[in-house]
Amino acid sequence: MNIRKWLGGGRDSASVSERQSLRYATVFILLLGVVSLFADMSYEGAKSISGSYLKTLGATAATVALVSGFGEFIGYGWRVVSGHITDRTGRYWTIVVVGYAMNLLAIPLLAFTGDWYMVAVLIVLERMGKAIRAPARDAMLSHAAIKTGRGWAFGVQEALSSVGAMIGPVSIFLVFLAGGDYSMAFLLMGIPALITLVVLYYTYTKYPKPQLMEPPRPAEKAVLPRRFWLYALAAAFMAAGYIDYPLVAYHVENHALGEEMVIPLLYALAMGADAISAMVLGKLFDRGGPKVLLLVIIPAAFFPVLAFSDSMILIAAGMGLFGLGMGAQESIMRAVVADLAPVGRRATAYGYYNTVFGMFWFIGSLALGMLYDLSIPAMITISVGVQLVSVPLFLMFLRDKTA
């Protein structure tokens, strides 16, 4: 008899079980990433031209910033309700499917309106859909991430999302290159929207209860810790100063800095930087923890200095820094929330975090959009300054070891 094999049999069985659990979780994470890829192909493709489209319909810079900011506010603000409902009901998939359906069906409808008021309504409805499904999706992802490492899981999901966010704007560019117009471009974005819903349904059939991948911890407190709120405040100041892309697109269009078709390409560049940074930062996060954020916040804060210049080369460089910051916001900053929140309050935590984030983003976007019409240098200065306020707050968060 092989004594060593007999004695180690239990460990071998455990090892096989762990590998199976890891594989199961990894496939789920990748499927959610594919869902995000096609969803962002649709949404980010539309977003890349929404600012310039609103301008062609007669909207001002302040209006573009208001629509963009209010859309993001709804997209983040409603998540506190959605997250609470998710944790109370446990109906992750129902909430996710409803959110994605609303999120994606609004985009092709943009092809059938030529009034900026209706465009604004559809943009807000699209963001409302994201608000409904995001906390449930992030909670499901965080449950699977316990097997793979949170940084890696959120990094992969954001990287695949960013690949879609590159393909979407490039597709828009090709539509314009072929002589198409805004309506044709928005209709084209309906194709990846449909694929998203098909992949989402397939994922549901294979993983009906993803929350079971992370068992509850008996000694865990049910309340959100003080560190969570300190972290949310730090992230909020980063959001308040972070100018959204539609205002950059407006700037390029307003100053005639390039052909109309260049605008989606700039956004594709930003999303490429987003994808790369999300993967790299995710791996660094799993090794070094939240302090990795400080490597991103400071350089990314200066993207408006380049993005609102009169040089296309500098604007392109600014889009690289913009993508770096977005990669952090959508990967490791979400991973930190999962580490701070109890298992049974995970969706609620994402809801609160994103509501605070979105409220500050909305206020900042509105104020910075108004400043653009008055003084671009003043807008840039305030944008950078507000983002840098987050640095000492993040340092306080890192030093605070309380529960």
Image (cartoon, rainbow, N blue to C red):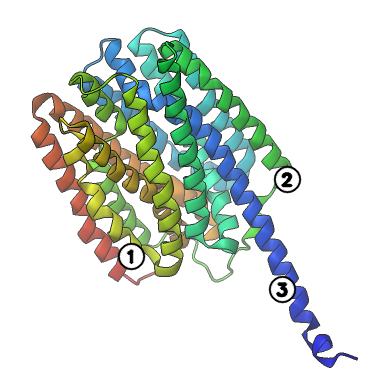
289 with respect to 161 (left or right): left
Asked whether the beta carbons under mark 2 and mark 1 sit within 8 Å of each other, the answer is no
Q: Residue at x 48, y 32 (%)?
A: 167
From this view, report whether residue 386 is shown above or below residue 71: below
The amino acid sitting under disc 1 is Lys
Q: Which residue is mark 1?
A: 291
Q: Which of the 4 image quarters holds residue 247?
A: top left
Q: Which residue is mark 2?
A: 206
Please state which of the two labelled residues, at mark 2 or mark 3, is closer to the viewer: 3
Q: Which residue is mark 3?
A: 15
Sequence order check, earlier mark of 2 and 3: 3
Q: Is residue 358 visible?
A: yes
**Label 1: few (<14), some or many (≥20) within 10 Å?**
some
From this view, report whether residue 6 is shown above or below residue 94: below
> How far from the left and from the top, in percent, is residue 231?
33, 57
Sequence order check, earlier mark of 1 and 3: 3
Q: Residue at x 68, y 49 (%)?
A: 209
Closest to the observer, 8 or 266: 266
Label 2 and label 3: CA atoms lie apart by 23 Å
Give the total number of marks visible in the rendering. Answer: 3
**Label 2: few (<14), some or many (≥20) within 10 Å?**
few
